[in-house]
Image: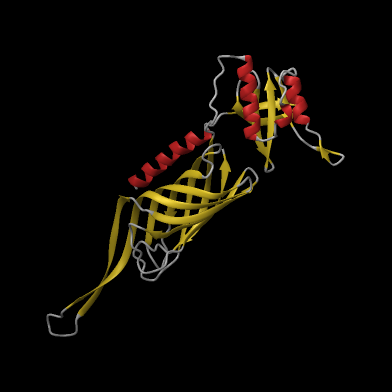
Amino acid sequence: MKPITNLLFLFAVLFYIGITSAQTQYVIEGKTYTLTTEVEGTLSLLYTSIDNEIRFFSKKGTDIKELTNTKTNGDYNDAYKKVLRDQTDGSMDDLDDIKLTLGSLRDFYNTYNKSKDRAYEYDENPIRLETRLGGFVGGSNTAYAENPTNTNHLSVGAEVEFRDANVLRRHAIAFRLKQTLSTDEHDYSETNFSINYRFKPIVSEKFDAFIQIKVAEYLYSNYNSLVTISNPDPNGGPDIVTTQLVEDKGDNFNFAGALGIGADYKVGNGFITFTYDDIVSVTQDNNGNFPLNFTVGYKFIL
């Protein structure tokens, strides 16, 4: 079980990295919010996600105001522009072009902070690491291992996904740890740790669709099978047939090159996630059965 222990330790390290993202609690008008800092300076931009909606807050000193744009008599009131005008003491003239979006606000805050502090530095294309962590269950017919009865197996696991939510929004790296459980019909089990690249042709606030390539994997498997052995009868009678249990276990590391697809649908502060893994592999042959390897789960945005 040492390989499994090492994998669990590695995944725990990845989990720790994910949860250490910088978030701070603030009390604003009597309510407590956990906010992420996007721009920090004389004027700071903070944000959070509540009920599937990104909400922005502006901080100057100890003064924190929410940036809103609600409708009044059918028209948007641009209330956030008044907050920005008040907190900048009217020194910024181009507020009309500011939109209530992360990119537009970030540019405005950086421009203002630079005007107030010559030593202020910022990256015009900053990387904003987004981490998604969750678990899943699924089914697999273990098409890349010996499975003469094409038996389906229950699988459980967890994954952590990293992506740059600003510049490289369509690209992600996912680390997955999956345990496939044995059945009465097919006494095969495996522990699989994989590194996966995901390209997301569809990216939105509510829905992502991606193509997944399993770049590399570490696999530890255990297969018990009954083998029938026939030996001649020394007395000239019918062959003597015996059955014995054969255990085949071991581990290996390989560059899988396996193709899959998947999708994430936003619910609450996370996503319902679905994957169809290992549809085809460029480095491994299947056992003659078409691969059926599905998972469904939920992952949180950290």
Residue 30 seen in the figure: no
Q: Position of residue 165 (x, y in %)?
A: 55, 38
Q: Residue at x 69, y 42 (%)?
A: 51
Q: Is residue 240 left or right of residue 49?
A: left
Image quadrant for the C terminus?
Answer: top right
Along the viewing direction, whichever of 105 and 134 lies nearer the viewer: 105
Residue 153 against residue 100 in the figure, above or below: below
Dividing the picture into quarters, in which one does residue 225 lie? bottom left
* Number of numbered markers: 0
Residue 138 seen in the figure: yes
Q: Residue at x 13, y 85 (%)?
A: 236
Dividing the picture into quarters, in which one does residue 221 lie? bottom left
Q: Position of residue 207 (x, y in %)?
A: 61, 50
Q: Position of residue 100 (x, y in %)?
A: 70, 34
Along the viewing direction, whichever of 185 and 242 lies nearer the viewer: 185
Dividing the picture into quarters, in which one does residue 80 lie? top right
Residue 16 against residue 214 in the figure, above or below: above
Along the viewing direction, whichever of 76 and 298 lies nearer the viewer: 76
Q: Is residue 225 left or right of residue 124?
A: left
Considering every residue shown, the one lying at the far right of the view is 73
Q: Is residue 146 left or right of residue 265?
A: left
